Amino acid sequence: MQFMLLFSRQGKLRLQKWFSAYPDRVKKKTTRELITLVLQRKPKMCSFLEWKDLKIVYKRYASLYFCCAIENDDNELLTLEVIHRYVELLDKYFGSVCELDIIFNFEKAYFMLDEFLLGGEVQESSKKNVLKAIAAQDLLQEEETPQGFFEDHGLG
Amino acid sequence: MICLHGHIVFSPSTGDKTLDGYQKKKYVCKLLFIFLLGHDIDFGHMEAVNLLSSNKYTEKQIGYLFISVLVGASSDLMKLVIQSIKNDLVSRNPIHINLALHCMANVGSKEMADYVGGDIPKLLTSGETIDSVKQSAGLTLLRLQRSSPEMIPLGEWTSRIIHLLNDQHMGVVTSATSLIEALVRKNPDEYKSCVSLAVSRLSRIVTASYTDLQDYTYYFVPAPWLSVKLLRLLQNYPPPEDPSVRTRLTECLETILNKAQEPPKSKKVQHSNAKNAVLFEAINLIIHMDSDPNLLVRACNQLGQFLQHKETNLRSHNYALISDAMWPMESWRLFKGQTERDVSVRQRAVDLLYAMCDRSNAEEIVGEMLEYLESADYSIREEMVLKVAILAEKYAVDYTWYVDVILNLIRIAGDYVSEEFQLLHSKYHLCSPNTRGLLLSTYIKFINLFPEIKTSIQEILGSDNNLRNPDVELQQRCIEYLQLSTVASPDVLATVLEEMPPFPERESSILAKLKKKKPTATAEGGEEKEKEPRTIPQAQVNNAEPSAPVPLQAVNNTAPAGNAGGAAIDLLGLDTAPAPAAPAASSGLGFLVDVFGDQPATNGVDDDALTAGAEENFKKFFCKQNGVLFENDLLQIGIKAEYRQNLARVGVFFGNKTTFQFTNFTSNLVLADSSKSALSVQPKAVDPVVDGGAQVQQLFNIECIDSFSDAPLLKISFSYSGQVQKLNLKLPVIISKFLEPAEMNSEAFFTRWKALSQPEQECQKIFKAQFPQDTEQVKQKVLGFGLSILQGIDPNPDNFVSSAILHTRNQQVGCLVRLEPNKQMQMYRLTIRSTKPEISKALGDLLETQF
């Protein structure tokens, strides 16, 4: 996988993960192009599209679009399930995840993605194991956190 | 904080540089947040790097996140980052090691590979490393290998890396397989021994029951990600040389193919996606190995089956997958190479080729088909000719090519063309002048399409009968066409006689012919269709015996005694089903036909009664726009609708499923008295004749003027085999179709909700669930109904809160909806509020039927 983008129905980018080195300029241009491209598509349309020399696999969950760019010989059906598994992980962790969870707890969303995908490949497909790793992190955080951090942080 | 030209410039709030770790973390975290909101951040990097050396995990973690997301590989700070990584990699705390590894895998620069990459292989293969670190190390190594392949020599580690395929921990294997595949691509020989390990791992997965692998089973599919990775790894090698490994691999692939035939263990799309992902990768491997004809044939059959899959989404995925991989050509070549005895498999291959044809490969595929046509089995030849003609017609970018193809077609199978032409012309003198005019136009087009019958056509055009015809129109056509055919060059002819630009949903006449040959999509035995029983639809039975419902079986039983004799008994024998279906094949059943034929075609009382099943099908359209509205043995009626604000465009498609014509075909939309002032309908006329196997479209442009509660009635009538058939269906044009979803925040929602507090403005329904209360399904229905789904308004996440605007010409009405499922009781409570009581009620009545 080359990169993964999460954006809202209004076209706001919520999370970006690049598995190869791209210059900032290219990242911005790519993001813009893909958001427009995907948002234009109708609900019944196929979730796969060809874009430059990559394939785009996307799926909408509530108000968020999850969009992955994969190489031409990658398996797009399974990429769709990579997206789904990530959504399941977020959902399990946040409990009925919504867009705001990802906005305000973006760091968790990133940490979770790192446990699940690394270097663009699936590292750990077991939901239990990924959540266990995150729980271990949370435990450390709790031990280290001075009171009030969460509230402070939650308010941005 | 200062905003300067859109860039945000700010510094830690304390002003001096003595921030403690916690403050730094907060600062860096805020910067990240601002960046993710879409602003440029080009400062604060140093603070982030400082966090890396903190001994507090959370501070370190945020620091690394900042580096991964914001700092490019080319940053000046990278040296400091690498130093921190180096320190963390030797940490005793595995969770710190993982942070460093994740950062390397995310940034993946050459410099990193150079300075710290050398430590990774040891970490990956050491017996002391814990599983989660191994997993991360494997993929970090992969990322570093990609960015700088030469930096990290792996020679001494090769064998240990390969043996990770045997690891106890599935996660480690998952990660290692990706790494090994990348290494294999560069150096297949060195890693050759991974084949047998990969095969045995794969074998253990595919033979595992879905409980064996516990959390690695994904929607009843055992370890789909690992399976796909292993199957891809094996695609780097030829079939295994060792016979036992080879047998084991064949068994694996067979098991995967067998599983594809099993009924699905779950209806969820995740199950079928994961299962098919593995299946497709297995088929890829089979085609890559190209060694076992048995497996190849099965793979091809499987692909063929997918092409006929009912679910469009999956089918389109399959199309995409198959055409991407160029499998049809591959498998086609394999097919040509081997002598496939089974005609139906050959047919499949041709079907596949035909289905896969698009603009980019049309030339190649048509070429292949023409070549195959010469040696093709007679039973599939005619169909192949049609297919080639369709493809050539559809994808003719270049006229020279098109003409060449058609010429070739005529050379190989040309006898069909001229025979058919003679047959057509033999009826010419029986036709009315209007029809003759059309026929003449057809003939001149034939000259373009089939140049080899040019002379016979010119003879006809030049005959006295035509050239001196008393009908001026015919005479003029003949003279002009004759001149055109003699004067114009083939290129000019091709341009002049080019087909009209396509109408929407137009169907090629050849395609219709093809459909006629194969009335149903699923290939059945060739003779089957000739004697398919034709059940008389319920509607007609109603018409025949409205007042005295004599069981049809009884009528049937008296028939042979009356006059039909042996033939009727035969037919009964055919129709052993107890259902009251009257098989009315054309001959030998004179009596029965008379009984029905003599009945008055219309009958006042029952004329408006709905056809059986119409109500149920109608309800299926509340939450969708397209689908099948009605289907029986004779006719399929499909709907395709588009709505924009208060306007609707509804296409109704009538497909004749029989091989005979429907005549006197009419289809009218009748509005209930209550809806007459609320809807304005502009129907397009429909052709009174529907040929066997053909589909005709009728378009209705509808405007919603005011709210209404009764859907229009679609009355269809036609004659088939001398009998009048009548259908009364409800067209799914309902008030909710003119809803447009609206977004609003919680405050706006509650303000409006409270404003609509008069009792008659609210419609509340409490009802029992008719369908499983699956949140996702309910959500799809709510969205399909035309409502929005508003997040964060109802504290209970199971509840749905929606809003929409109803568009009519006279007014726009805002509607608020709340749907509360109660899973214990299997009940729903539905509350709708709008300014118009009748609209709240109408929407409530409609929505109530859907959950």
Image (cartoon, rainbow, N blue to C red):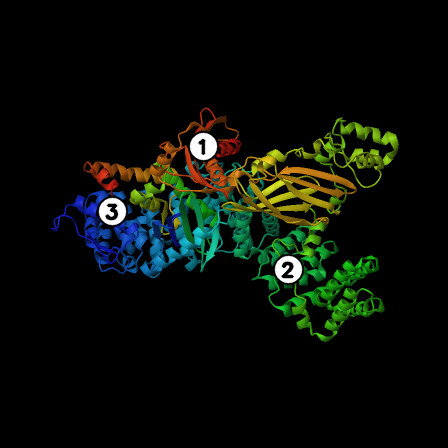
Q: Amino acid at mark 2?
A: Leu
Determine the residue positioned at 74% across, 46% down: B664
State which quadrant residue A127 falls in: top left
Residue under label 1, please give it.
B832
Q: Is residue B741 left or right of residue B115?
A: right
Residue labelled with disc 2: B391
- Local secondary structure at mark 3: helix
Question: Do marks 1 and 2 share a chain?
Answer: yes
For disc 3, the chain is B
Q: Amino acid at mark 3?
A: Ile
Side of B7 relative to A116 (left or right): left
Q: Amino acid at mark 1?
A: Ile
Residue B62: mark in rendering = 3
Viewer can see residue B545: yes
Residue B451 in percent (x, y) is at 73, 68
The quadrant in which residue A30 appears is bottom left
